[in-house]
Image (cartoon, helix red, strand yellow):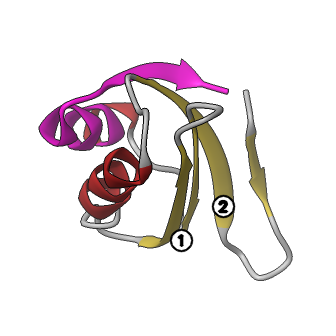
Amino acid sequence: MTSQTDTQGTVTTVYKVSGMSCGHCEGAVSGEISEIPGVSSVKAVASTGEVTVVSAAPLEEEAVRAAVDEAGFELVGLA
């Protein structure tokens, strides 16, 4: 599991998302995940399929899955 808490009390989690192929894809996934309460930053990288999410507390996987689905992609799991 790739999730860690830093000294400022935030949690950084890296998810694997399939189907992203360009900057527009990255923006769509980032935009949907950033709507989840508690999320402070999202960085999606299409070339690796990795999405790094910084949040105030661990996120429910179902909330992340729903956001990724809404963007039109598939959450594979934790990277």
Element type at mark 1: loop
Above or below 74: residue 11: below
On screen, residue 62 versus residue 53, left or right, reads left
- Upstream in sequence: badge 2 or badge 1: 2
Task: Give the residue furthest to the front.
Answer: 22
Q: Name which residue lies at 23% across and 44% down.
A: 67
Q: Name which residue lies at 39% across and 33% down.
A: 61
Which range is magenta?
64-79
The 10 Å Cα crowd at callout 2, few under 14, some 14 to 19, many 20 or more, is some
The answer to if 71 sits in the magenta stretch is yes
Q: Residue 62's image quarter?
A: top left
Numbered badge on residue 56? 1
Q: Name which residue lies at 61% across and 35% down.
A: 47
The residue wearing badge 2 is: 11
The answer to if 12 sits in the magenta stretch is no
Q: Foreground: 18 or 66?
A: 18
- Asked if labels 1 and 2 touch by Cβ distance under 8 angstroms, the answer is yes
